[in-house]
Image (cartoon, grey):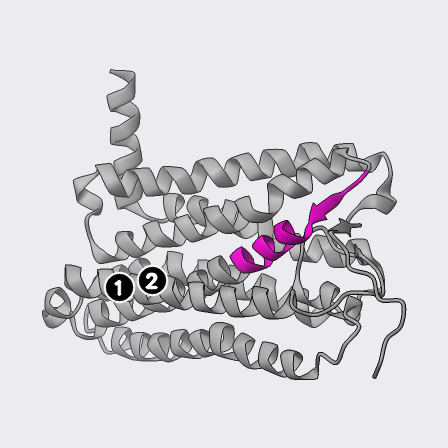
């Protein structure tokens, strides 16, 4: 199909919450507070794992990388969203839009991968504890994380460069508060079928395959826990997995709710608020979950506070 009067756009307009008028100021205050909590919480987890010797274990090494991924994910989207809430132009440059798409896939891929590795870590610790130190040694842990970062880089580059290679001629207004694939594809004035097919495949590989691996790990974990003769042993084994189970449920639940409900939700603002559940809320809640349900993290935090007070 040939399109006439094609226009090359240097900027995109992020329509986002523009229709809410003066309520944007209230949203700015709320999102700013939540964002600061997310940044402080995840940075604190990263800092504690670095300085506290009691947290020098594979589980906390992976938790540190998870916090870094969440910190990068939320910082990629929220600062620009906060600026646009107070600005009349609400624009983002073409390169800035590409950077947002890249880091969304980069950190999103990394988060799915790290959650899977953390499930494997719990699987080895509970189902094969005698070989845990051999299987999950330092070199293996570092290699697993490097593979995750490499996978994120590859997915981010392919997705961002491919989608921005399309000519855009219909409009430069994105009905969203950040650059994402679903709102940007309808603006392309060329056939995007092959990209949409590739996008679905990548989503399945990056998001749902890790979920299947996580579920498989926990099926074996539950089977092993139920076979333990001691009630105290079962309680301790389950407590080591509870924080991770809550985080996985929160992350995949919010993502599924957002994308499954998109077609049934009529209001654009409602769709945007659903997106905020995994963009802002999940990065804020994860450090709280690990702090409240993990005695080692609580101990490291209390030691840090006592040291600073002294």
The part of the chain drawn in magenta is 89-104
Instruction: Find out whether residue 93 is within the magenta segment.
Output: yes
Q: Is residue 278 visible?
A: no
Q: Secondary structure at mark 1?
A: helix
The answer to whether marks 2 and 1 mark residues whose Cβ atoms lie closer than 8 Å is: yes
Instruction: Find out whether residue 115 is within the magenta segment.
Output: no
* Residue 9 locus on image (x, y percent): 77, 56
As drawn, the label of residue 237 is: 1
Residue lying furthest top in this view? 310
Q: Residue at x 54, y 59 (%)?
A: 102
Q: With 187 as the anchor, is 298 left or right in this view?
A: left
**What crowding class fits label 2: few (fewer than 14 Cα within 10 Å), some (14-19), or many (20 or more)?**
some
Q: With 163 as the anchor, is 117 left or right in this view?
A: left
Q: Residue at x 66, y 79 (%)?
A: 196
Say which quarter of the image contains residue 1: bottom right
Q: With 122 as the anchor, is 285 left or right in this view?
A: right
Q: Is residue 16 visible?
A: yes
Q: Nearer the viewer, residue 18 or 122?
A: 18
As drawn, the label of residue 241 is: 2
């Amino acid at each position: 199909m040939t399109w006439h009067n094609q226009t090359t756009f240097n900027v995109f307009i992020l329509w986002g919450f523009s229709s809410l008028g003066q309520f944007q100021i209230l949203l700015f205050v709320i999102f700013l507070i939540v964002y600061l909590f997310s940044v402080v919480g995840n940075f604190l987890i990263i800092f504690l794992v670095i300085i506290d010797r009691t947290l020098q274990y594979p589980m906390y090494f992976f938790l540190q990388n998870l916090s870094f991924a969440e910190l990068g994910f939320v910082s990629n989207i929220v600062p620009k969203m906060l600026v646009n809430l107070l600005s009349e132009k609400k624009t983002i440059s073409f390169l800035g839009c590409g950077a947002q798409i890249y880091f969304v896939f980069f950190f999103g891929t990394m988060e799915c991968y790290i959650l899977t590795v953390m499930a494997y870590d719990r699987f080895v610790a509970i189902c094969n504890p005698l070989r845990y130190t051999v299987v999950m040694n330092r070199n293996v842990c570092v290699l697993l994380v490097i593979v995750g970062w490499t996978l994120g880089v590859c997915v981010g580059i392919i997705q961002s460069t491919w989608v921005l290679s399309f000519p855009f001629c219909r409009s430069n207004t994105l009905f969203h508060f950040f650059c994402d694939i679903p709102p940007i594809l309808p603006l392309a004035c060329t056939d995007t079928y092959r990209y949409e097919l590739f996008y679905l495949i990548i989503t399945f590989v990056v998001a749902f395959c890790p979920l299947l691996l996580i579920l498989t790990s926990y099926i074996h974990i539950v089977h092993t826990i139920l076979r333990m003769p001691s009630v105290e042993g079962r309680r301790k084994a389950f407590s080591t997995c509870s924080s991770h189970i809550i985080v996985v449920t929160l992350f995949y639940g919010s993502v599924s709710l957002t994308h499954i409900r998109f077609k049934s939700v009529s209001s654009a603002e409602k769709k945007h608020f659903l997106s905020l559940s995994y963009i802002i809320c999940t990065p804020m809640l994860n450090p709280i979950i690990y702090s409240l349900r993990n005695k080692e993290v609580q101990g490291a935090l209390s030691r840090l506070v006592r040291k600073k007070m002294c």
